[in-house]
Amino acid sequence: MAYERPQKELRLSKDEKRRLLKQYFEDYKSQAATDSGVLNQKLPREALNDLLNALGEMLLAESKNLASKEGQVRTFLDKNPLSPAVEKYLSPEFRVFCLALNAIKQWVAAEQSATDRYLLGGDARNLCREVAEHCLVTGETIGPDCELHHPVRDGRPPIPLSKHGHDLIEGQLSSDGDDPIERALSGVRRKGNRSWAQLRRGCLDLIGQPEAGSSTRGTANDRAFASKAAAAANIGYEEILEWLETKGR
């Protein structure tokens, strides 16, 4: 069965879209006044582990199949032979796997862009900028270079924020550099006045490898911290531990 992109049944006029966006932004403005965290909710990656594992298994199986049978993929491999220096290290199955990952990356980018158009149509991003007057976080006037921020990646429209407002929501302060994981983790760490050691202990406990000597109360707090950090960075606990290791923290 061929994949078909989701399409909505009801179509809105431009005026209806504007009214919808105005109400949508007002709803978030009232919520963010008491809890700015509502503007940045991320589903923990482990919640979709079963789906991701199934996709991974299918990808591996199909890569092996495509590498072994005649067709465009096999022809492409033959026309682009490997250097003798690396040929013995890269199997045809792995090469197809890498090619498939790149194709999937492009497909995901296109489909994710289409989700922004699902409700509001092709002019969705411009409509959001036109309707919003002030940043919900800082109160600054929204300019043409504003950031379109998705409070939740579940199909709802993005919300225009000033660059500074977007940085505050994402925990992306300039001192955090260009590492998106560091920006996300540092934001949660600063907000809760926590340490990297507490983050490590919480992650270890959540994957069933508790650090020796941790107190029950401390462990519960560390677990809560690790859970918030994983949600903010949209990665798993083991990935956080790997990141901490590479950063020497």
Image (tube, rainbow, N blue to C red):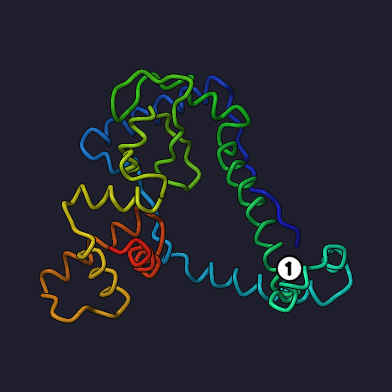
User: Which residue occupies 61% across, 47% down?
Assistant: 109
Residue 207: quadrant of the picture: bottom left
Secondary structure found at label 1? helix
The structure residue drawn at horizontal position 38% and vertical position 68%, both measured from the top left corner, is 242
Q: Name the image quarter holding residue 121.
A: top right
Foreground of the two, 222 or 26: 222
From what the image shows, is residue 169 above or below residue 137?
below
Report x, y in % for residue 119: 56, 36
Viewer-proximal residue among 227 and 8: 227
- In the rendered structure, the answer to whether residue 160 lies left or right of residue 100 reads left
Closer-to-camera residue (121/203): 203
Above or below, 206 relative to 195: below
Q: What amino acid is at disc 1? A: Val
Residue 217 image-quadrant placement = bottom left
Per the image, the residue denoted by label 1 is 96
> So how many labels did they put on this image?
1
Residue 24 locus on image (x, y percent): 40, 31
Percent x, y of residue 17: 52, 26
